[in-house]
Image (cartoon, rainbow, N blue to C red):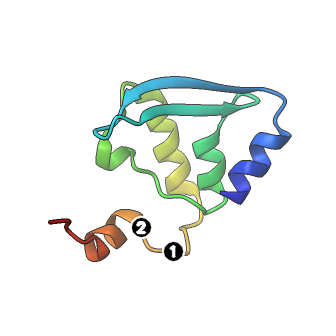
Amino acid sequence: AALTEELISKADKVEYLEGGKDKYGRALAHVFLDGELLSVLVIKKGLAYELTSKFGPGGFPGLSRVILKAFRSAPPPKFEHPLYWRARNQRRRD
């Protein structure tokens, strides 16, 4: 979060492409900072996992390929993948 905040605050231009809504009704978007995809910037720092391979391209197959390529060439994050963590720790609400 700190890196994202820093990158956004230093950007001259912030743009986004809307990608619909997730199953909870939250807006989905790809964010660009000075023309660079924010997802790629965070992945290259080893601070994010890609989720495209799990959830699909969301209507943006070209951007998904860019994200996957960045993830394959980036240092692996030093934390557990959120999907695996949730699977182990999520509690069902009754």
Label 1 SS? loop
Q: Residue furthest left?
A: 94
* Crowd class of label 1 (few under 14; some 14 to 19; many from 20; radius 10 Å): few
Q: Which residue appears at 49% of the width and 55% of the height?
A: 72
Question: Image quadrant of residue 38?
Answer: top right
* Quadrant in which the N terminus is drawn: bottom right
Residue closer to the observer: 66 or 35 = 35
Label 2 SS? loop
Q: Which residue appears at 56% of the width and 56% of the height?
A: 73
Question: Image quadrant of residue 33?
Answer: top right
> What's the residue type where badge 1 is placed?
Phe
Q: Is residue 42 above or below residue 66?
A: below
Residue located beneath label 1 in the image: 79
Residue located beneath label 2 in the image: 81
Q: Position of residue 68 (x, y in %)?
A: 46, 46
* Quadrant in which the C terminus is drawn: bottom left
Residue closer to the observer: 77 or 27 = 27
> What's the residue type where badge 2 is placed?
His
Residue closer to the observer: 82 or 60 = 82
Q: Position of residue 76 (x, y in %)?
A: 54, 67
* Crowd class of label 2 (few under 14; some 14 to 19; many from 20; radius 10 Å): few
Question: Image quadrant of residue 93?
Answer: bottom left
